[in-house]
Image (spheres, rainbow, N blue to C red):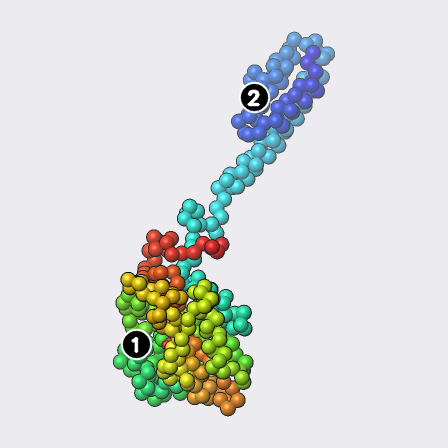
Amino acid sequence: MTDLSTLKSEVQQAVEAANDIAALEEARVSALGKKGRVTELLKTLGTLPETERKDFGARINVLKSELENLIEARKAKLGTAALDARLMSEKADVTLSVRPEDKGAIHPISRTIADIVALLSPLGFSVAEGPDIESDFYNFAALNMPPDHPARQMQDTFYLGLGDSGAGGLESSNPESPSPQAPMVLRTHTSPVQVRTMLQSKPPIRILAPGRVFRRDFDQTHAPMFHQVEGLVIDETTHMGHLKGVLMDFLRGFFGVPDLKVRFRPSYFPFTEPSAEVDIGCSRPGGKIKIGEGDDWLEVLGCGMVHGKVLNNCNIDPAKYQGFAFGMGVERLAMLKYGIPDLRTFFEADLRWLRHYGFSVLGD
Ligand code: PHE
């Protein structure tokens, strides 16, 4: 007679070994199906003597229900495992690139701003930011450009809300609220961040103000939106010699030319006195600019000692404090450093351009 406990352990093994629903069903059929081993045993009951039949029948039925429970338990487990596996295989990491074959790249503008900050922050500069939409006070009046100041015309300003005609106004002494005479503007430089910083904090001040600026201009070297980084240092002792040292070191580091010729040429800005424009040595063989060689000059930034009137407007005593400011165009520096010929292409979002001029995320 078949040993029921052997049968049980064999079926049990087959059930445990089944790794998917199909294999489990096979194990079930071979034990409990119409021609399964347990079913076949039940069929033999009739051949047994009456005395044994009852007892053996009961044992087979116990075995049958045990095996059914086993199979059910295994089925539940395989079902959960199958669901888990499916969830795992179908899981989507929403932070991954939609097209992993297309690696992202850092835009030359971001890269250039990061380079400028990296070169200057060891000197104690920290980054300050301000709004793109500015009041007349922060963008002009506080910077020693009263309403009728001719320098306002140099800036090709976008005025907001009140047409493009009004160039500032009499009421620009109110820093926050616009008036018909002094409408809000898209900031024409990041100098308003300097004003905000001076009004909010006490010297010593050392900040860099990177950001978007806006002017009504559009050609190969001008875009209506571009980027600047301005710098400001205010304390009791900083003088023009420091300004020259900082900018010379910066430019030599930025262009990677240790003996780069740097020239400070007297100039005019309403917010600095004295003011200078800074030129670097270059040559122009066949019209192409080569930095760091030759006898030609190329203008790269504006700078000067902060005007006493600006300090006064920002509640800083010009008899006690002084310092310098400088400003540079990010696109212009990037064009020179990376040989990009047209400023407008920075903002065309042309993937081929981005692949060509972009930088790898992990540095290069
Ligand atoms: N704000 C000036 C501009 O945008 C740049 C500048 C800043 C010049 C600081 C001198 C000092 O034209």
Quadrant assignment for ligand 1: bottom left
Q: Residues within 10 Å of mark 1 (few under 14, many from 20)?
A: some
Using the image as rendered, state which of residue 200 and residue 251 is in the foreground.
251
**Mark 1 close to ligand 1, CB under 8 Å:** no
Q: Is residue 302 above or below residue 101?
A: below
Using the image as rendered, state which of residue 157 and residue 326 is in the foreground.
326
**Mark 2 close to ligand 1, CB under 8 Å:** no
Using the image as rendered, state which of residue 243 and residue 1 is in the foreground.
243
Labels 2 and 1: the sequence-earlier one: 2
Residue at the image position 36 percent from the left and 67 percent from the top: 294
Q: Is residue 242 above or below residue 17?
A: below
Where residue 349 sits in the image (x, y, percent)? Answer: 34, 58
Q: Secondary structure at mark 1?
A: loop
Residue at the image position 34 percent from the left and 70 percent from the top: 296
Residue at the image position 30 percent from the left and 76 percent from the top: 156
Please name the residue that numbered disc 1 is placed on: 156
Amino acid type indicated by mark 2: Val
Say the numbered circle drawn on residue 56.
Answer: none
Where does the N terminus fall, quadrant-wise? top right
Left or right, residue 266 beside residue 85: left
Q: Secondary structure at mark 2?
A: helix
Please name the residue that numbered disc 2 is placed on: 29
Left or right, residue 220 beside residue 126: left
- Image quarter of residue 47: top right
